[in-house]
Image (cartoon, helix red, strand yellow):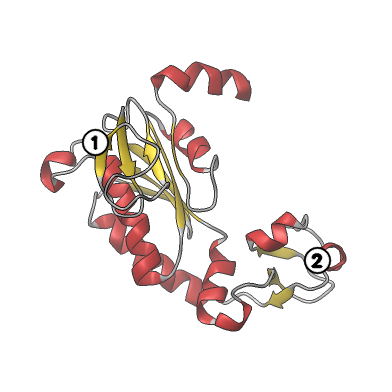
Amino acid sequence: MPALCRDCLETFENGRRCPACRSPRVTSHPELYDLSIAHMDCDAFYASVEKRDNPEIRDKPVIIGGGRRGVVSTACYIARIKGVRSAMPMFQALKLCPEAVVVRGRMETYVEVSKQIRAMMEEMTPAIEPLSLDEAFLDLTGTARAHGKPPAAMLARLVKRMRQEIGITGSIGLSHNKFLAKIASDLDKPRGFSVIGAAETLAFLSDKS
């Protein structure tokens, strides 16, 4: 079965660990190299930018929003584990996670980081459909010949570059249509890479009906 290491980008056949770097962060699927419709979603984007820019809060629960009378814009995964959710009243969020660090959003900064990520995606394909600052569909059909590697490998390289060069992590969903690619990107967050092929399509559509 085709397999891809998300850490060193090695491609190989079969195995739960990468034969090159021994990483367990391996994505394998019978259709891994045949699918070309992807959804990339940054992981807790606003909170991740704030943690990147302020190392003192990197390991703390972070909530993006206004004062106690406002609502939560978003929250990092540590805060989400405590039950904090977007659009939740801030006072309720702080009851669930009183140790959280509340940060006012910096939209200009988020827009700039989003532009940097978009530029990386444009190196792969012009067929990009942004959904918001932190997520987009990518159609990589026909790009394997130009780049010398299948779409799956290009996507793994994208999120690796995002982490190394921008300091933001993302999750990838790969499928044969946008609907399923978006579902796939949410299956293994954060830093996930999930595939929904033809064999699983009926099961996923049945679950959503």
Picture disc at residue 141: 1
Identify the amino acid type marked 1. Answer: Thr
**Which quadrant would the N terminus be assigned to in this image?**
top left
Which residue is at 45% across, 55% downward? 170
* 10 Å crowding of disc 1: few (<14), some (14-19), many (20+): some
Residue 86, visible in the rendered structure:
no
Badge 2 element: loop
Q: Is residue 145 left or right of residue 79?
A: left
Q: Nearer the viewer, residue 187 or 11?
A: 11
Which residue lies at the image location 35% right of the left edge and 50% below the top edge? 22
Q: Is residue 11 above or below residue 88?
A: above
Q: Horizontal and vertical percent for residue 68?
A: 83, 74
Image coordinates for residue 61, horizontal then vertical, percent: 69, 69
Residue at image point 54% right, 23% down: 204
Residue 168 appearing in the image: yes
Give above or below for 199 relative to 10: above
- Residue at 53% over, 57% down: 43
Distance from the alpha carbon under mark 2 to that under mark 1:
44 Å
The reply to whether callout 2 and callout 1 are in contact (CB within 8 Å) is no
Residue at mark 2: 97
Quadrant of the rendered image containing residue 195: top left
Give the label, 2 or 1, closer to the camera.
Answer: 2
Residue 67 is tagged as none
Secondary structure under tag 1 reads loop
Residue type at tag 2: Cys
Across and down, in percent, residue 38 comes to 38, 40
Q: Position of residue 117 (x, y in %)?
A: 37, 63
Crowd band around label 2 with a 10 angstrom C-alpha radius: few (<14), some (14–19), many (20+): many
Left or right, 10 with respect to 170, comes to: left
Vertical position of residue 9 compared to residue 29: above or below: below
Quarter of the figure that contains the C terminus: top right
